[in-house]
Amino acid sequence: MMRLRVHHLLCSALYTGYGYSEDFCKNMQTVVERLWGEDVLEGEEVELVISPDAICKECPNLTAEGCSLDHNNVVSKDASLAGKLSLTTGRSYVISELLQHVAKNLTEEAFEKSCHNCEWYAKGLCRYEMLAEKYQKRWLTV
């Protein structure tokens, strides 16, 4: 079962090939296809976590202490986002049900609080409207 940080529910939806290294990008693409591809396995589950996950494992910014980019503030970001989305960390979710739940519960406030200080947000690679549209088209029409 794949482990996934809560904020990666947002990042994975709008991933466009940018990343911290070539290995990171290859790994991220694999995770994105697993979550967002047309062939999401029926009943496949992910465990939501507030610690390094399937995406972080290839990140050059991952240290033994956690994320070196933000002095590991990402833990509180994940916990806050989980609360805003009414999700429980440490719990397993069926991917399709989880992403449908996010599509129904995502707000602009939750997005902005989670993403406003991210470098990919600053570069204009993600916006709430883009994310909400992607979630709605993919997971609310299932």
Image: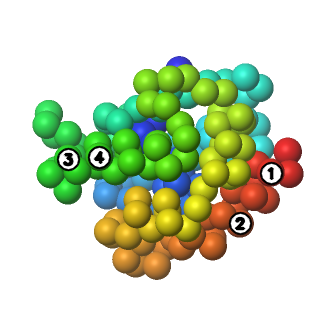
Q: Split into 4 quadrants, where in the image is the C terminus? A: top right
The numbered disc on residue 133 is 2
Report crowding for label 1: few under 14, some 14 to 19, many 20 or more residues within 10 A (C-alpha): some
Query: Of label 1 and label 3, which has the lower sequence position?
Result: 3
Residue under the image location 34 percent in, 50 percent down: 77
Report crowding for label 3: few under 14, some 14 to 19, many 20 or more residues within 10 A (C-alpha): some
Residue under the image location 67 percent in, 42 percent down: 101
Q: Secondary structure at mark 2?
A: helix
| Position above or below: 127 against 81 | below
Rendering quarter of residue 65:
top left
Q: Nearer the viewer, mark 4 or mark 1?
A: 4
For disc 1, the marked residue is 140
Q: Secondary structure at mark 1?
A: loop
Query: Of label 3 and label 2, which has the lower sequence position?
Result: 3
The numbered disc on residue 76 is 4
Q: Nearer the viewer, mark 2 or mark 4?
A: 4
For disc 3, the marked residue is 72
Side of 111 where 13 appears, left or right: right
Q: Secondary structure at mark 3?
A: loop
Whether label 2 touches label 4, CB < 8 Å: no
The Cα–Cα distance between marks 2 and 1, rounded to whole angstroms, is 10 Å
Query: Of label 2 and label 4, which has the lower sequence position?
Result: 4
Residue 121, given in percent of the width and then of the height, sits at 42, 72
Q: Is residue 57 visible?
A: no
The Cα–Cα distance between marks 4 and 1, rounded to whole angstroms, is 28 Å
Q: Secondary structure at mark 4?
A: helix
Report crowding for label 2: few under 14, some 14 to 19, many 20 or more residues within 10 A (C-alpha): few
The Cα–Cα distance between marks 4 and 3, rounded to whole angstroms, is 8 Å
Residue under the image location 39 percent in, 48 percent down: 80
Please state which amino acid type lies under the numbered disc 1.
Answer: Leu
Query: Of label 2 and label 1, which has the lower sequence position?
Result: 2
Number of on-image labels: 4
